[in-house]
Image (cartoon, rainbow, N blue to C red):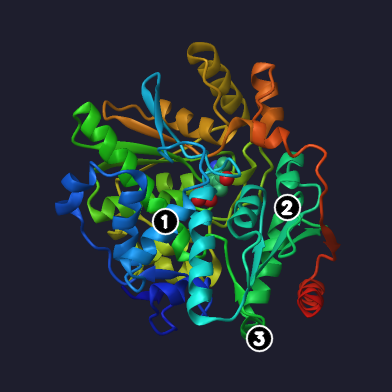
Amino acid sequence: MKYISTRGNTESVTFKESVMMGLARDGGLLVPCEIPNVTDKLNDWMHLSFQELALEVISIFADDISKPDLKIIIDESYANFRHDEIAPHVKIGDFYILELFHGPTLAFKDIALQFLGNVFSYILQLRGGSLNILGATSGDTGSAAIYGVKGKPNINIFIMHPTGRVSPIQEMQMTSVIDKNVFNIGINGTFDDCQYIMKSTFSDLDFKDKYNLGAINSVNWSRVLAQIVYYFYSGLKIMKNYGSSSVRFSVPTGNFGNIFAGYLSAKMGLPIKELILATNENDILSRFFNHGDYTLREVLPTVSPSMDIQLASNFERYLFLKFNQHESFRSFIEHGTCKVEKERGYDIDPIFKACKGTTEETLNIIRKYYKNYNYVLDPHSALGVLAAEKIKSNIPTICLATAHPAKFSNTINDAIGMNATHEVLEALKGMPTQSDNVENDVNSVKQYLVDKLNNS
Ligand SMILES: *Cc1c(COP(=O)(O)O)cnc(C)c1O
């Protein structure tokens, strides 16, 4: 399988090259040059464990890694999960809640970032050299990425977070990792500032090459790839167990990475009737899928911070696959906005249904599911459940639970007057921490990287 850039100005690369490249060199995103159809495999895939299925799905796209090697990488990646099934579901009310938070940092990002960490190590073992990861986080990505590579030889990880703007628990999850290859950088600014510094640093290709920079944000194709697995895993299992011929998914969405993996699963032949895209008040994607309008607005802070995003980076991948030939794609690349109008013949995929939820609705859903079913949803997962309730259907509905509620204990307390806890988070209390403050400026961060690398 070869990967091409959405901007069309780089040569095609292999899977391993795509992993190391992260962002395409022309500033675009890497996408597979074809989407394989796997319809004839679904009957066999129904009976596989999560890890076995991961091997089948991932080997199609990562065909430059031998299957025995890939099996080792996959088994290692899911060995630290706290549930045998990796991605179990529970039936709650009318819905199947797919619990994706049983990894080391209690958010769904572990599923892809544990895998990516091991793929990085594998490639470095083969070809030698070192890798210096630079990433930005608004909360969950940072700790999941750090846990994916902490202690690994020849890899350093630098994660920027906006000082004082990630939750205390999320900050503690990052800064309590004191391995020598982990560098937490507090930036006196917003998440957008951190992301801007990251992108500017990557776009300095000389610097990127000289210091072997790598990406763990969802610009890295392997993150989307690893997420395809749980769509097939849960979809096939629920179809088999409940005798249904199709399913639908409800996905709390921020950067469009998770739901884009669902979209690719449908393209590959998984019978998905609907993909419900749930947003909070930062509803740019729900405006697009309901009205064809992708216009940037200011980011509002909400109780579901991992979805507080306006510029959804994976959206470029979707537009490329769907509207590559249309002026709307060019407008998106040039101006960051676009309008898709029905009457001009380009329609939006009917598979997407989009729905926005407010803070009040989020708290109400958490309260309702606790009261009726004794089940505590985190605020992100609650938005997905809310959207599934609003967009009714008789088709079995799988709601993705993207984080454990204990990560957002304050909001849970506001909703149900009780703290959500988890032993992993309790254990962090009182641990030593490490973090450096660096000025909110590209050159200061580059200088910090250079200083640390020269001293290590
Ligand atoms: C990252 C994250 C999301 C958003 O996922 P995207 O792939 O960015 O759409 C939703 N919920 C939680 C808990 C997250 O950490």
- Secondary structure under the numbered disc 1 in the rendered image: helix
- Secondary structure under the numbered disc 2 in the rendered image: loop
Residue 428 placed where, x, y %? 74, 39
Left/right of residue 341 with respect to residue 175 in the rendered view: left
**Residue drawn at point x = 24 percent, y = 63 percent:** 36
The quadrant in which residue 190 appears is bottom right
Q: Amino acid at mark 3?
A: Lys
Left/right of residue 329 with respect to residue 198 in the rendered view: left
**Residue drawn at point x = 67 percent, y = 44 percent:** 300
**Quarter that holds the N terminus:** bottom left
- Can residue 254 be seen here? The reply is no
Q: Which mark lies nearer to you, 1 or 3? A: 1
* Residue picked out by circle 1: 74
Which label's residue is closer to the chain start, 3 or 2? 2
Does 247 appear above or below 218? above
Q: Nearer the viewer, residue 169 or 388?
A: 169
Left/right of residue 102 with respect to residue 59 in the rendered view: right
* Residue picked out by circle 3: 210
- Secondary structure under the numbered disc 3 in the rendered image: helix
Q: Amino acid at mark 1?
A: Ile
Which label's residue is closer to the chain start, 1 or 3? 1
* Residue picked out by circle 2: 177
Q: Nearer the viewer, residue 322 or 344?
A: 322
C-alpha gap between disc 2 and disc 1: 23 Å
**Quarter that holds the C terminus:** bottom right
Q: Nearer the viewer, residue 128 or 160?
A: 128
Does 242 appear above or below 350? above
Residue 449 placed where, x, y %? 76, 74
